[in-house]
Amino acid sequence: MDRRRAAPLTDREEITVVWDEACDDDAVIRVGQAGEWSFAIEHGIPCAGGRLAAVSRGGVEALRLDPCVDHSPSMYSYARDRVLVCGFGIGEEVWRWGQQPDFLLAELIAAGVLTADDEYARDDISESSQERDRHTLALLETRFGLTRPREEVEGQPLQAFLVR
């Protein structure tokens, strides 16, 4: 991949670039658009997370979902107008942070993820952690209008950039 120009890559091709061509400190970011949202998918050494608030200037909303495949929990963060509004681990919603940590509390309660007492509404015994996490992910999808089908994001070539 030419470091100076963008190239369209599928998810599988992006992973190949990360493993075969990227240096230890590089990441490959694929970008696209779904409805009113622009999105970026990052593979390699994560570099975008620390820039979330900076990206969200001038009324722009920025949402980050880091699946943390090597270790849990997956992480959610939301920024607006250069401020980290809220964030939490998926499956660890009782521990929230940001300028408005309770930004999604009403929705987490309505979705049956948390109780009004800020406790977990479901226990580990009655549901698998993946099933519990789906409730939070569905809430985020609905709340922010995230509707891009997974097969389009993974299989469709998107503009990609190699970043340090």
Image: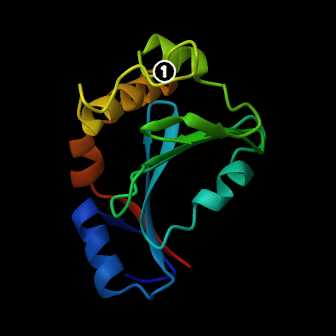
SS at badge 1: loop
Specify whether residue 163 is in view: yes
Q: Residue at x 40, y 57 (%)?
A: 68
Q: Residue at x 77, y 45 (%)?
A: 82
Q: For mark 1, does the 10 Å Cα neighbourhood hold few (<14), some (14 to 19), or many (20 or more) residues?
A: many
Query: Which residue is depicted at the point 26% across and 42% down?
Result: 150
Residue 13 relative to residue 94: left or right: left
Q: Residue 135 appears at what percent x and percent y?
A: 35, 25
Residue 71 falls left or right of residue 26: left
The quarter of the rendered structure image containing the N terminus is bottom left
In this view, the residue in front, 58 or 27, is: 27
Is residue 70 found left or right of 94 in the rendered image? left
Q: What residue did someone put label 1 on?
A: 114
Residue sitting nearer the eye, 69 or 63: 69
Q: Nearer the viewer, residue 133 or 148?
A: 133
- Let me know if residue 10 appears in the view: no
The C terminus appears in which quarter of the rendering? bottom right
Picture layout, residue 86 above or below residue 161:
above
Whole-percent x, y for residue 121 in the image:
41, 19
- Whether 30 is drawn above or below 85: the answer is below
Residue 154: x %, y % from top left: 25, 52
Check the image and tell me how it is coloured: rainbow
Name the amino acid type tagged 1.
Leu
Q: Position of residue 117 (x, y in %)?
A: 58, 16
Q: Is residue 69 above or below residue 57?
A: below
Number of dots carrying numbers: 1
Q: Quadrant of residue 98?
A: top right
Query: Residue at image x 44%, y 42%?
Result: 33
Drawn side of residue 164 relative to residue 113, left or right: right
